[in-house]
């Protein structure tokens, strides 16, 4: 099999992993002088395909031969797909070739389990080590960490990679046990804890050895089991606080060829993935707790409206917020007001009282935010306080299909 054929198979096999975004990289000063592809200066740009997946990296598997049998995975041992395996040198060559042609900004490298976790992790680390040490490669590297690999190998991975990630795969440990019988939730947690320790150490002192400056991330598959959004976001909340993850990526399950009977036949709606990203964003930047994002019974996010608007409609007693006096935390909960807009409001009201006419100059999305704020000179309040608020703000069905899916 030639390199092109391997690339076709192993790039296709890698597309199911959503956990690659290139944020958080830092300059590789330690090597000094000029080198190939420093990610600093212009920085790594975040480039997404229309379906929201990152495309700026060469995203491949070392191999799609895997001895594990995770039901949701096209590369599982019982799957009937063409198989291929790169030699480490082939990946290095491809990365350098693509990089020098400006096709990519870096490498995302994962793998099926070849013989065992340590052997597989050794191969992944070897690629990263040689790119850095032999070829002075300064592009972005995201290495997938194999959960069962030894701590020494995880430590080595972080020395060369900008980001490392261990996939949680399923938010529910019961589902993980059922759908990925060879994986173990406790081992995944141990690996994440180990990575967190190394990351913390490297940040604690200015001269500490470099370790994954882009931090660690993970992926959760949505819709392959019956886990509700509430449970998924609770898990994410724990992951962010316990292991200080940079990102949790949500990947809507889509049926794979030759699928296991344990899996649903239908794909999870992409809008569900999108709503989870929005809710995740609210937890990380807007001060929401996961339990606030759901009403008492459902445990699922509203697919028609974003979670912040859904929360605001359930809590009309907390509105309107006075634009001239409301605290930052309350302004952040107003639908349509983003973090930057709130900062602009706070800066503007330090100078003088904000009036209705000022809102447009501050680029506020008035249709969404006016029903939830109080501002002098607002002549439309009578209309927007009507009981029709929900239907006015709820998009029409046909508009839903036009929503982007990336976070
Ligand atoms: S370990 Fe599981 S998820 Fe990973 S490649 Fe193998 S079968 Fe797929």
Image: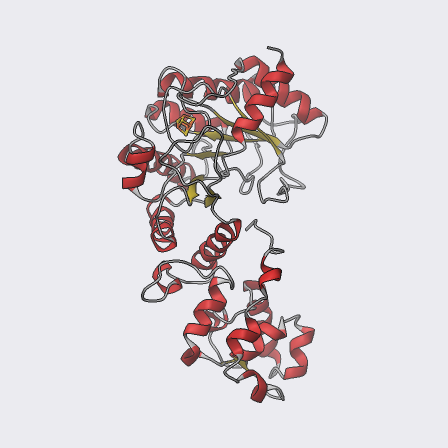
The percent coordinates of residue 48 (x first, y second) are 62, 42
Q: Is residue 378 left or right of residue 268?
A: right
Q: Is residue 136 among the parts visible in the rendering? A: no
Q: Indicate how the structure is coloured in the image.
A: secondary structure
Going 57% across and 41% down the picture, which residue do you hit?
53
In front of the other: 400 or 338: 400
Q: Is residue 332 left or right of residue 41?
A: left
Q: Is residue 357 left or right of residue 312?
A: right
Going 52% across and 29% down the picture, which residue do you hit?
14
Q: Is residue 108 left or right of residue 204?
A: right
In front of the other: 305 or 336: 305
Q: Is residue 278 among the parts visible in the rendering? A: yes
In terms of image quadrants, where is residue 394? bottom right
In this view, 29 is above or below 272 = above
Going 59% across and 66% down the picture, which residue do you hit?
396
The percent coordinates of residue 15 (x first, y second) are 54, 33
The percent coordinates of residue 316 (x first, y second) are 44, 78
In terms of image quadrants, where is residue 22? top right
Q: How many marks?
A: 0
In front of the other: 1 or 334: 1
In front of the other: 176 or 320: 176
The percent coordinates of residue 110 (x first, y second) are 48, 27
In this view, 362 is above or below 113 = below
């Amino acid at each position: 099999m030639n390199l092109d054929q391997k690339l076709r198979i192993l790039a296709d096999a890698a597309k199911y992993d959503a956990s690659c975004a290139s944020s958080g990289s830092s300059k590789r000063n330690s090597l000094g002088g000029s080198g190939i592809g420093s990610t600093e200066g212009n920085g790594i740009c975040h480039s997404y395909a229309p379906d929201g997946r990152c495309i700026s990296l060469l995203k491949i598997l070392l191999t799609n031969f895997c001895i594990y049998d995770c039901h949701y995975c096209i590369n599982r041992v019982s799957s009937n797909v063409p198989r291929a395996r790169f030699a480490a040198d082939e990946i290095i060559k491809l990365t350098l070739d693509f990089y020098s042609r400006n096709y990519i900004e870096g490498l995302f490298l994962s793998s099926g389990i070849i013989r065992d976790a340590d052997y597989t992790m050794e191969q992944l680390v070897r690629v990263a080590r040689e790119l850095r040490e032999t070829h002075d490669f300064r592009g972005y590297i995201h290495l997938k960490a194999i959960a069962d690999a030894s701590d020494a190998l995880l430590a080595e991975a972080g020395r060369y990679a900008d980001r490392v990630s261990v996939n949680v795969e399923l938010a529910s440990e019961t589902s993980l046990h059922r759908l990925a019988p060879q994986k173990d939730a406790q081992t995944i947690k141990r690996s994440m804890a180990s990575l967190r320790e190394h990351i913390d150490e490297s940040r604690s002192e200015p001269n500490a050895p470099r370790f994954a400056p882009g931090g660690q991330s993970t992926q959760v598959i949505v819709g392959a089991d019956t886990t509700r959004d509430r449970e998924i976001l609770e898990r994410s909340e724990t992951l962010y606080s316990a292991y200080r993850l940079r990102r949790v990526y949500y990947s809507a399950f889509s049926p794979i060829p030759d699928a296991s009977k344990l899996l649903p036949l239908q794909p999870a709606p992409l809008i569900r993935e999108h709503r989870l990203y929005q809710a995740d964003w609210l937890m990380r930047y807007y001060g929401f707790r996961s339990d606030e994002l759901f009403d008492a019974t459902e445990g699922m996010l509203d697919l028609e409206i974003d979670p912040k608007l859904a929360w605001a409609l359930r809590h009309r007693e907390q509105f309107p917020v006075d634009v001239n006096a409301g605290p930052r935390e309350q302004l952040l909960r107003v639908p349509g007001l983003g973090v930057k807009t709130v900062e602009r409001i706070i800066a503007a009201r330090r100078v003088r009282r904000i009036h209705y006419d000022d809102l447009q100059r501050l680029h506020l999305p008035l249709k969404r935010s006016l029903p939830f704020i109080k501002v002098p000179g607002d002549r439309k309040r009578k209309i927007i306080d009507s009981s029709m608020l929900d239907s006015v703000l709820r998009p029409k069905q046909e508009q839903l299909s036009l929503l982007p899916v990336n976070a």
